[in-house]
Structures are given as C-alpha cells and as structure tokens.
Image (spheres, rainbow, N blue to C red):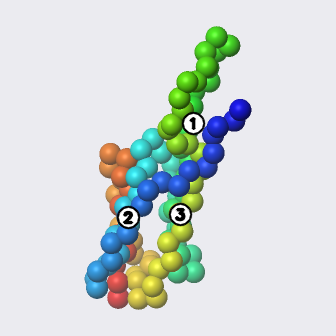
Amino acid sequence: TNIEKDFNPPMDLIETNEKIDVFIELPGVENIDITINNDKLIIKGAKGGRRDVSNNEVYSYYERQSGDFKRIIHLPSNTKQKHIKTTFQNGLLHVEIKKK
C-alpha cells in the first residue's frame, strides 16, 4: 500500500494596514520556490518521505507528512509585490509583503 501523498503545510496569515505576514510550517523542507504572479503569492516545494525498509521490516505507524505542496495566497492590489522579505528559520517560513 502506498501511503505517501501530497501534503498541505499549516499556514497563518496576518494582515495589517501596513503589511501582510505569511507563516508556513515547513520542517524538513530544503528547497522552497516563492513567486508572485498575477496578484498571487505562490509557495511550493517538496518534503522527503519515509525511508525504505528492508524485507523483514514493516511500518507499524507512518504519521509524518511528505510529498509535494503548493500554497497559493491571493494578494490585494495594494501590496508592493516586487518587494517581499523572506526568512526561513527552524522550519518556519515567514514572508512579509508591504502594502502601498
């Protein structure tokens, strides 16, 4: 049975009059692609899955999520989409987008 599937990492979005802050939990993800296109913030990547087991091993539990992901956030037209700030620390991605 193939139990691996795409996953949807948890996200928080905080909006003020000055900016939008997006926080996404991405532990174990190394390559993250962040783009803005047509008023959409697109964040995608992949998280490695389970390790291969030998013939005498079997998974009793497999709860860690893995697979490809893609999050799309629709941005209001009053954002400065060419000037974003990103940080990635301890598995947490933070994207800050200032407003006009």
Q: Which residue lies furthest to the right in this view?
A: 1
The reply to whether callout 1 and callout 3 are in contact (CB within 8 Å) is: no
Q: Residue furthest top?
A: 56
**Residue closer to the observer: 18 or 31:** 18
Circle 1 sits on which residue? 49
Left or right side of 87 for 8: right
Circle 3 sits on which residue? 71
Question: Looking at the picture, which amino acid does disc 3 mark?
Answer: Arg
Question: Looking at the picture, which amino acid does disc 1 mark?
Answer: Gly
Secondary structure at badge 1 equals loop
Q: Within 10 Å of the Cα at label 3, are there few (<14), some (14-19), or many (20+) other Cα atoms?
A: some
Circle 2 sits on which residue? 12
**Residue closer to the observer: 81 or 29:** 29
Left or right side of 66 for 96: left
Image coordinates for residue 79, horizontal then vertical, percent: 40, 83
Q: Which of marks 2 and 3 is nearer the N terminus?
A: 2
